[in-house]
Amino acid sequence: MTLENYFNSSFQSDVAKLQFRWVPQVLKDILQDQELVLFGGKNWSTVEEDLALIDPENRPQFILCLFALVATDQCMQSYFKAHYAHWRSQTGYPKFGWTRFGLYNENPLKLLSVPDVAGLVDVGLSTALLPEFTTFYRQQIQDYVRQHCPELTAEHFFGQLCRDAIFELHDGTLVPAFKQAMYTLMQADACPSDAGDGYLMAA
């Protein structure tokens, strides 16, 4: 099964198997998101429970697709605020993080590093999927911005994403391999030099 086929056929049902966390109503009101739910906790503390119901053969595809949706949501919220409400209304996926005295987004790269370090995913297979994944991810972003916000480009989106402080994470084998695959894919494209000073993990 190709990664695109997995995304279109099984990913949604696998996302529904995550261990979702309740969000206080006051935070839903502040964030104007009544459907908001969380998963993961700090440092993806629920990784074993979250992956327990995912077929081990599908875990590499699952964590890569999950990373894509979480990273996109956080990047849109941090750098493309004018388009975030529309994005959120179109997707409504759960957020990766936890609550305490507010909502805290976790680093989306931990969706790759935590199961890698914990031995919960086939790192070799996951790494082998990276060229296919980065191409697929880029195409998904291209299709989205052309349809919903044509003044943006995939190059601008990934320029902001790859310059964000989340990319300081180097844990495990999969995260460095992903970053290299992403840089390889993007190296021929013109990257914006005016990266903002937002931060993906800001609520």
Image: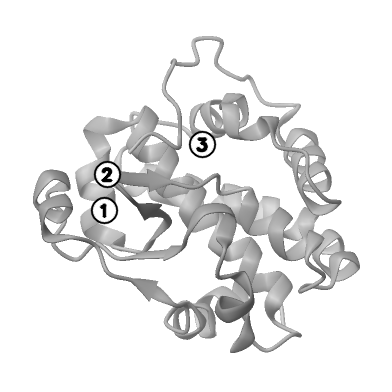
Q: Which mark is residue 160?
A: none
Q: Assess disc 3: are there few (<14), some (14-19) or many (≥20) residues with their C-alpha within 10 Å of its C-alpha.
A: many
Question: Toward the viewer: 48 or 53?
Answer: 48
Q: Quadrant of the N terminus?
A: bottom right
Q: Quadrant of the C terminus?
A: top left
Give the mark nearer the N terminus: 2 vs 1: 1
Distance CA(mark 3)–CA(mark 1) = 18 Å
Residue labelled with disc 1: 88
Residue labelled with disc 3: 154
Residue 169 lies, in percent from the top left, at 70, 37
Residue 141 lies, in percent from the top left, at 49, 47
Quarter-wise, where is residue 46 in the image? bottom right
Q: Which mark is residue 101?
A: 2
Q: The residue under label 3 is which amino acid type?
A: Ala
Residue 95 lies, in percent from the top left, at 38, 57
Q: Looking at the image, is 12 positioned above or below residue 81?
A: below
| Residue at point 63%, 86% (across, down) | 52
